[in-house]
Amino acid sequence: MNSMKMVTALLLALCAAGCAPSFDAAAESGKLAQRDADWSSVSFEGKDIDKIVSYWSDDAHVLQPGLPPIDGKTAIRAFVAASLKIPGFKIHWVSDKPVLSPDGKMAYVLSKVETTAPGANGSLQSTHGRSVTVWRRDEDGIWRCVVDISNDAPAAA
């Protein structure tokens, strides 16, 4: 092989290596799935506002049905605190497997959500919804939710 072909082959090999993911997709998917499940558990317990809020990034956006956007951790913290003051309020979700971006820096997760709160007559009622959360793996390697969108599930046919 002449030197030009060897250099070309070497450059192609280096490019291929450089284009390969620099993360373990299965491991990151598992980490994110566990983080999401932990967040659901902490939220359901409803005892530690700071811990619940820690799963969102500082620049996160929460979009809930019938409410204006809730932007940033300070506003999200106020929203969570107000929610937890509602007598009987509970929230729990079960998520599908995370879908990671090719570079492993972003992901989304679809979930089924159950929320319990007093209904119009004052008795506790559970509603079912769906959500999509968009996650970012920050420089410290921790997955944080950057966009949290929920909506009501359609009534069963």
Image (cartoon, rainbow, N blue to C red):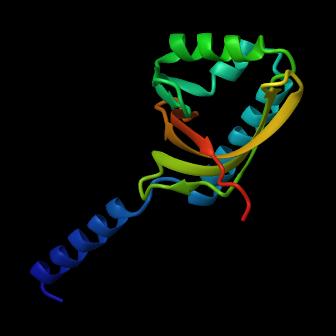
Q: Quadrant of the N terminus?
A: bottom left
The residue shown at (63%, 21%) is 54
Q: Which residue is depicted at the point 85% across and 15% down?
A: 87
Give the quarter of the image for residue 86: top right
Left or right of 40 on screen, residue 135: left
Q: Is residue 50 visible?
A: no
Point out residue 156 in the picture as x, y percentages from the top left corner: 74, 60
Looking at the picture, how far across and down is residue 150, in whole percent? 58, 40
5 left or right of 35?
left
Q: Quadrant of residue 25?
A: bottom right
Q: Is residue 45 above or below residue 1?
A: above
How far across and how far down the image is residue 123, in percent?
89, 25
Q: Which quadrant of the figure contains the C terminus? A: bottom right
Which residue reaches farthest front?
Answer: 121
**Image height of 82 relative to 135, above or below:** above
Vertical relation: 43 (above or below) 13: above
